[in-house]
Amino acid sequence: MTETCPGCRAELEGVDTVTHRYIGASPACWDTYTRLLAGDPPMVASTLGSLLVDAYAAQHPGGDSPQATQSAAVHLVVLEAMLGHGMALGLAVPARVAAVEVGRQGDGYPKLYPVPWSWELTIADVAEAETATERGLVANRYIRSVWEAWRELHGPRIDEWHQAARQLMKH
C-alpha cells in the first residue's frame, strides 16, 4: 500500500516506522531520507551534500508548532545563505546557530504561507537514481530545487531573515 508524504507529496510504499516529531514527512519518506543519510543506498559525496538536511527539512515544514515553524525558517536561512549569497558551505553550522538566535531574539519566526504545492524533485528521486554518482548529482539538483521553490514564493522574507542572521555572525 502506498502513502502520500504530506511534505513533498511523493507516493511511496508504506512502512511501519516512526517519524520526526515536527518534520512533516510520512513514515515512508522519513525512512527513505534517514536510510539515504546512512548510506543505503550509497551516494557519492555531492558538492552541496552538507545542505541535504536543510533541503529536506524545508521541503517538509510540518505543522504550526513553534518548533516546526522555526525549523523550516532556520533551514531556509541556511539555504539562502549558501545558495543565494555564496556563503562558504563550511559556515552552514554557524549560519544555523545564528538563524536560531534571530528567532529567539524576536517573537520566533512566522509560518510561511503558502507552502510550495509541487516540487521538482523529492528525496525519493535522489534515492531512486541508478548509481551512487547519479544520486550525488540528483542530490545537488534536489537541494537547489527546494530552495528555488521557496524563494519564488517568499524570497524577500527569507532574505530578510538571512541578513539578520548574517549580522549576528559578524559579531
Image (spheres, rainbow, N blue to C red):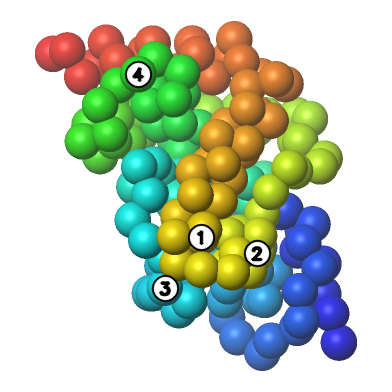
Residue 69 seen anywhere in this rendered image of the structure: no
Kindly report the distance in space between the C-alpha atoms of the residues bearing marks 4 and 2: 27 Å
Q: Determine which of the numbered discs, if any, sits on residue 135 in the image.
A: 1
The reply to whether dot 1 and dot 3 touch (C-beta < 8 Å) is yes
Question: Which quarter of the image is occupied by the N terminus?
Answer: bottom right
Residue located 73% across and 42% down the image = 120
Judged left or right of residue 61, residue 98 is: left
Tell me which amino acid carries mark 4: Gly
Kindly report the distance in space between the C-alpha atoms of the residues bearing marks 1 and 3: 8 Å
The quarter of the displayed image where residue 89 is located = top left
User: Mark 2: which secondary structure?
Assistant: helix
Q: Is residue 147 above or below residue 17?
A: above
Q: Which residue is mark 3?
A: 42
Q: Is the residue marked by circle 2 packed among few (<14), some (14-19), or many (20+) residues within 10 Å?
A: some
Q: Which residue is mark 2?
A: 124
Q: Which residue is mark 4?
A: 86
Mark nearer the N terminus (2 vs 1): 2
Give 12 or 113, whichever is nearer the viewer: 12
Mark nearer the N terminus (1 vs 4): 4
Residue located 58% across and 60% down the image = 126
